[in-house]
Image (spheres, grey):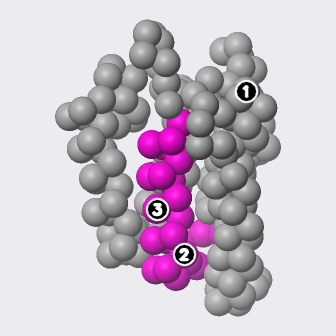
Amino acid sequence: RCDKSLVGQVTGELLKKTVAMMTKLPHDSPDAAALTQLQGHATATAAILKKAGPKVLANQDVSDLVKVLVELVSRVKLEPDVAVELAPKASGAAKDKDDSDSSDSESDEGGVTPQSVRYSLVDVAASLMKVSREEFVQVGLTMHMELLKHLLNNGNDCDRSLALY
């Protein structure tokens, strides 16, 4: 077993590198390749958080990650006339699989879409809430709740679906 502080340092550095790659998403209408890459990074980040376990991230790491997630969810825009895309289903069998297999949902439903990327980003936030509860409440909850309020009050059906996911 590794020392928890060492796991925290390694996880923090790995997340910083991954998050830096995630923020390279173009600001104006990202193409399919950029969205696919962002969804892959989000899936990897959620897996890193789950594997690292509880209480390994510092408050600053949690705060930085939540800021980036909020920014990215806001930057991934949907076309105005897009139909509501249902949230991915989390089946018991899928949870038992290796994390590398958990990204197969996009291939089952025809590819990566802006909404599927947004769901992946929210999955990162969910993983963060599970493994760093206290830290998330201290430094990330307010930012996250502001995003949710905005999506619920000012958004379209896809935004509301994402907020309730």
Q: At 36% from the left edge and 73% from the top edge, which residue is drawn?
A: 139
Which quadrant: the N terminus? bottom right
Is residue 123 something that shows in the picture? no
Which three-letter amino acid code belongs to the residue tagged 2? Asp
Is residue 81 something that shows in the picture? yes
User: In x, y percent, where is residue 94?
Assistant: 66, 33
Residue 141 location, quadrant: bottom left
Q: At 67% from the left edge and 67% from the top edge, which residue is drawn?
A: 15
Q: Is residue 138 magenta?
A: no
Q: Are marks 2 and 1 in contact (CB under 8 Å)?
A: no
Which three-letter amino acid code belongs to the residue tagged 1? Ala
Residue holding disc 2? 61
Q: Secondary structure at mark 2?
A: helix
Work out whether mark 1 precedes mark 3 in sequence or the reverse, and give the earlier one.
1
Magenta residues, start to end: 52-76
State the mark number for residue 67.
3
Which three-letter amino acid code belongs to the residue tagged 3? Lys
Image position of 88 (left or right of 51): left
Residue holding disc 1? 32
Q: At 35% from the left edge and 55% from the top edge, which residue is drawn?
A: 144
State the mark number for residue 117.
none
